[in-house]
Image (spheres, rainbow, N blue to C red):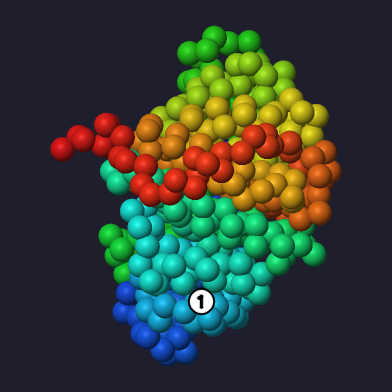
Amino acid sequence: MSYTRREILEVIRMSETEHFDVRTVTIGISLLDCSDPNPKICAQKIYSKISKYAHSLPEIVNEVADDLGIRVANKRIALTPLSLVATNPQPESYLEIAKEIDRCASDMGFDYVGGFSALVEAGFTAQETALIESIPSVLSQTIRVCSSINAGTTKLGLNFDAIAKVAKIIKDTAYLTRDKGSIGCAKFVVFANAVENNPFIAGAFHGVGNPEVLINVGLSGPGVVLDAIKRAGNCSIRELSEVIKRASYKVTRVGEIVGREVARRINVPFGIVDISLAPTPELGDSVGEVLMAMGIDTPGGTGTTAALALLTDAVKKGGVMATSAVGGLSGAFIPVSEDSAMIKAAASGDLSLEKLEAMTAVCSVGLDMVAIPGDTPYEIIAGFIADELSIGIINNKTTAVRVIPAYGKKAGEIVSFGGLLGDAPVQEIRTISPGRFISRGGQFPPPIISLRN
């Protein structure tokens, strides 16, 4: 694939004036051959495996970015879920391995590592239980390691025991990182229908169905879409969809060329482009601003879900016109703390948690980077997670929760994380307890739409 002169000039314009960047180049690495009951040996094998395939990636990504005149915000690693690799079922073993992975990422110049993960949609192994129990310690004692749990799928249903356990883990993590705004919770996400080729943190992991190593790319691009909508002016809904599709097409083309060129230079296969619009706290780089340009006065008002549905659909259509390698989550992210317009709407009370939940039925993922009062009981958090994940399994889509019970903070206060994670207004959450429902435990059966064979 080659670029025309016009396309090159378009890339430069998007980068310089529309906040466009490639959010992440993520290398996925299989660790299935690193399994060992001795955590020290397992950690050494993992370090060697990452070094073998990924040591040159940050430098090469920088070279490709310079050659194309485009910014690449992050370099990341996605690993095989660690519960499948580290076989000593003790939380201390997982902490030891996580610290070595963190050191490895630091030594090689990576921003984040995903894959401290467990797949527990239908129950627990001893290894998965130990990994989950180690999460608060891992997220409080490492910088780059990110964790995820898949607690449900449309085919298998929803594990309510996992949801209850995860809610307690989130509370513990918030406490252990209380001196940093409970930032440990920002490195953890719980999924339904998690995908194997997602390049975005905190949920990235390298699925067992993938090859030994793979390059996946995650895009940004709200600024490009925003500028296109503003130029289009007062057009019809159908025309608006076409405008977004064309902008998404251009963004996807850039992402694919970056991914393929990086993969070529390190001699590994190229995987997918995740065309999710990923915002930042910077003005002009906001999905919320895109919704406002579409005609919504403030994110959270009536019409917001419809506008987000149109946006997500058009982004996906534009992406699949540009490449056959669309994958991951793909659509539009709505992380509250990472989006300037969402931050403002949440702080004013215009964007409630209930409205956010409705919006997750049509966006890329789910309730993302939401801060709630630190004294919220775990049962409330469990119900919050259960509501969101049930949307996923009933509608056969990926949904997720990344929630921060900000220790010591009350509704209306602000918790600051810095960088791409931004500032989160602590939002009011309903305190009507679902405790009796959550405590029933067991498995939410797979919905009727799972019977598709």
Q: Can residue 238 be seen in this view?
A: yes
Residue 125 is drawn in which quadrant? bottom left
Give the total number of marks visible in the rendering: 1
Please indicate whether residue 413 sits to the left or right of residue 183 in the image: right
Q: Which of 100 and 14 is in front in this view?
A: 100
Q: Residue 277: x, y in percent?
A: 56, 39
Residue projecting furthest to the left: 453
Q: Which of 114 and 239 is in front in this view?
A: 114
Q: Is residue 27 visible?
A: no
Q: Which image quarter holds the C terminus? A: top left
In the structure shown, which secondary structural element does the residue marked by tag 1 occupy? helix
Q: Residue at x 30, y 40 (%)?
A: 446
Residue projecting furthest to the right: 413
Q: Residue 432: x, y in percent?
A: 64, 34
Q: Nearer the viewer, residue 99 or 172?
A: 172
Q: Residue 82: x, y in percent?
A: 42, 70
The residue beneath circle 1 is 91
Please indicate whether residue 350 sits to the left or right of residue 294 in the image: right
* Mark 1 closeness class: few <14, some 14–19, many ≥20 residues within 10 Å: some
Q: Which residue is drawn at 38% across and 57% down?
A: 120
Q: Which residue is drawn at 59% across and 57% down?
A: 168
Q: Residue 342: x, y in percent?
A: 70, 34
Where 341 falls versus 2 (above or below)? Answer: above
Where 36 falls versus 443 (above or below)? Answer: below
Residue 86 is drawn in which quadrant? bottom left
Say what amino acid the circle numbered 1 marks. Pro
